[in-house]
Amino acid sequence: KDKNVIETVDSLSRQPQIEMVDNMVVRVSIQAGTGIATQSTYFYDVENGLFSEIFYAVFDYHNGMIIDASFDKVVVRSAFDNSFYQEFTDFSDPFSPVAFPFVNICFIEDGQSIEVTYHSGDDYTEVTEIFEVN
């Protein structure tokens, strides 16, 4: 905001992806391998001068909330504090036998729900489900 350097990182194997995700929040993602599961991401709140913790496999950001995932669960949480945390682990279909089954996850309905697409079964069928964020 004041055109000052706020962080310097040395020895990265790849160039980070830096983007504004809303008017005052910067997203910094660093890819370590292939696929979103090997991507680390943190956020910087320009207005308040706050860094988030580092998250892995971040799919979406909306209004201070993020969606991240691990092999068997999806998590919606606040980006900068611990004020909100909700896990989603009850999926309708079994995951395909892959290291990371999630294809895409995004906020919908102005952040009131999430849409989760994942690979299911031995034929890797894409299944999409919608879950309400409480």
Image: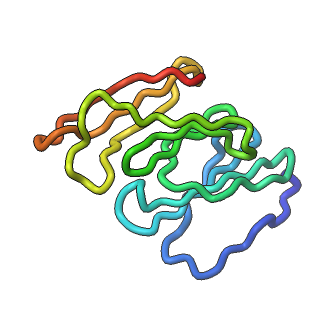
| Quadrant for the C terminus in the image | top right
Q: Indicate left or right for 129 with 98 as reference.
A: right
Given residues 5 and 123, the one toward you in this image is 123
Residue in the foreground of this view, choosing between 107 and 101: 101
Image-quadrant location for residue 83: top right
Residue at the far front in the pictured view = 90
- Residue at 41% across / 56% down in the picture? 37
The quadrant holding residue 3 is bottom right
Residue 36 lies, in percent from the top left, at 41, 54
Task: List x then y, in percent, for residue 52.
Answer: 71, 53
Q: Residue furthest bottom?
A: 11
Q: Nearer the viewer, residue 84 or 11?
A: 84
At 33% from the left and 42% from the top, the residue drawn is 103
Rendered position, 8 above or below 57? below
Q: Where is residue 29 drawn, in percent x and y?
A: 56, 58
Q: Position of residue 6 (x, y in %)?
A: 80, 64
4 lies left or right of 114: right
Front in this rendered view, residue 8 or 50: 50
Q: Give me the residue at 68% from left, 44% from top.
A: 79
